[in-house]
Image: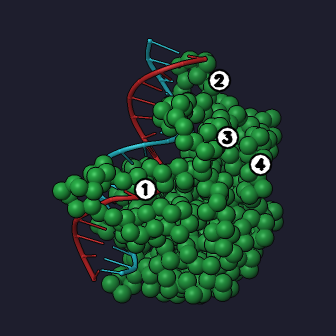
Chain colours: A green, B cyan, C red
Amino acid sequence: MFHQQDHLKSHLPDSHTASRQLFHCQECGKQYNTQLGYRRHLVAAHSASAGLPGSEGPPSLLEHLGSHIDRPPPSEGNNNTAVPVRERKYSCERCDRRFYTRKDVRRHAVVHTGRRDFLCPRCAQRFGRRDHLTRHLKKSHAQESGLMPPCTPSTPVATPTPAPQCPVKEEPSPVVSDMGSVSKEPMEPFSRDMYNSYPMTNAVPGMGHPHGLMQGSLSSSMGVARHMPPQSSHHHHLQPPVASQQQQQQPYSNMARYQHGSTSYPRADVDSFLLDLQSVPPPHLSAVNSSTSTSASPQREVLGEGVGAASDPHLLSRSPAISSTELSCTTNMDLGPLLGFLPFSLPPYSPHMGMGGLVMSYPPATTTSPPSSSSGLSSQAPGPFTFFQPSQAHVPQGPGAHNHSQLPQAYSSPAMSTASSLPHYYQAFQQ
DNA sequence: CACTGCCGCGACGCGTGG
DNA sequence: CCACGCGTCGCGGCAGTG
């Protein structure tokens, strides 16, 4: 709703076209989707330094951040302070940032890897940390889920999936490349190594790198379907100058909007996409996984199967039986792009998802539920969808059954076999 | 020591009032 | 067109637990 016409005008170009202008900070190279954002940045980050010396050129974002972080805290300023100085003895190999604890360093690694293994089952947003996903769910989907924040143990678990988290192991997220641009140096080598195991963009088309997705189905389903008038669909292919440059790293056409700090896809876009998705028969999903997840990307194995697969995620993920059920639904549509995309970026937006393994119980009310069904997806989709599955490990539980014990296997892939038993963070380091 | 989750801060996108 | 305020996300610090 826009009360003024000019508001609508300004809204449209900004929010629904890929061709919108990007604002580039000359000093640090950061990009902004909005002029406001750019201005704020200038004020906050460079107003003071405008006249200051010291800028030896545009520092990378990480370096820039590091400069702040490494700066001794106020109390630390003086060595003579009564308060014992706490030192950050653990430093990041990739950016020299220092942390108080080792675990902080590990967690920090996500910044470099750009990995976002935690996928929101409800909106396809991805997060690099579990707690971020938790927070997101609580804040953004609390009411939707109606029940509660999925994460809460209190959740009545019809389905053994208390945890909404769906670690999607594997896949370099769009952010990664973004990160690379931001933190030039440290990032480069690292990310490369990091993703050796999973070829980034083109190597494995089937993998459905998010980018690919964006270009293909996603873009079409997203912008075109709802936000954009049919004629404007071409916007998705337009590249902002900056974006084009990035495109090498990130195949997405729309990348520009999605990168930059926040990985989150514009909600509106996501919503529309999801809606679109709903309109599409779920079957494609199944098709996808068979083609992509299992074969194309071994790594991206299923995490854990939802309820059905609970007993044996592995089986589920590859189970022919399952696929057969899925196949029954398959259509002839060329879902390649979409499929590829799905696993990484979007969960099938349907109630089914929830049922399957997601921790959260979605309101059954979801209007458009593809016929195929509820039982279907959750149980059947071993493929990409499994990503959405809650690591059922959480559920049943016992102390023994815990993420780490089960998920890893699920994740395991030839390439990452060693990582399988490792915690998420460790996996991030796997090379 | 590892892992998880909460908290606070800073930053950005977006909608809206002036 | 500009500026403000809100909502959300990224990130680091840190406490709790096993």
Q: In front of the other: label 2 or label 4?
A: 4
Q: What label does residue A217 carry, if any?
A: none
Residue at numbered disc 1: A70
Labels 3 and 1 in the same subunit: yes
Query: Mark 4 belongs to which amino acid?
Result: Gln
Residue at numbered disc 4: A245
The vertical placement of C5 against A92, above or below, is above
Look at the numbered discs 4 and 3 and tell me whether their residues touch, using CB distance below 8 Å.
Answer: no
| Residue at mark 2 to residue at mark 3: CA–CA distance | 17 Å
Residue at numbered disc 2: A9
Q: Position of residue A141 (x, y in %)?
A: 43, 52
| Residue at mark 2 to residue at mark 1: CA–CA distance | 43 Å
Of marks 4 and 3, which one's residue comes earlier in the chain?
3
- Per the image, label 2 sits on a secondary structure element best described as helix
| Residue at mark 3 to residue at mark 1: CA–CA distance | 46 Å
Query: Mark 2 belongs to which amino acid?
Result: Lys
Q: Label 2 marks which chain's residue? A: A
Look at the numbered discs 2 and 1 and tell me whether their residues touch, using CB distance below 8 Å.
Answer: no
Q: Nearer the viewer, residue A66 or A181?
A: A66
Q: Position of residue A121 (x, y in %)?
A: 51, 61
Which quarter shows the N terminus of chain A? top right
Q: What label does residue A226 carry, if any?
A: 3
- Per the image, label 3 sits on a secondary structure element best described as helix
Residue A1 in sight: yes
Query: Mark 3 belongs to which amino acid?
Result: Arg
Pointer 2 local density, CA inside 10 Å: few below 14, some 14–19, many at least 20: few
- The residue drawn where x is 38% and y is 69% is A89
Pointer 1 local density, CA inside 10 Å: few below 14, some 14–19, many at least 20: some
Look at the numbered discs 2 and 4 and tell me whether their residues touch, using CB distance below 8 Å.
Answer: no
Look at the numbered discs 4 and 1 and tell me whether their residues touch, using CB distance below 8 Å.
Answer: no
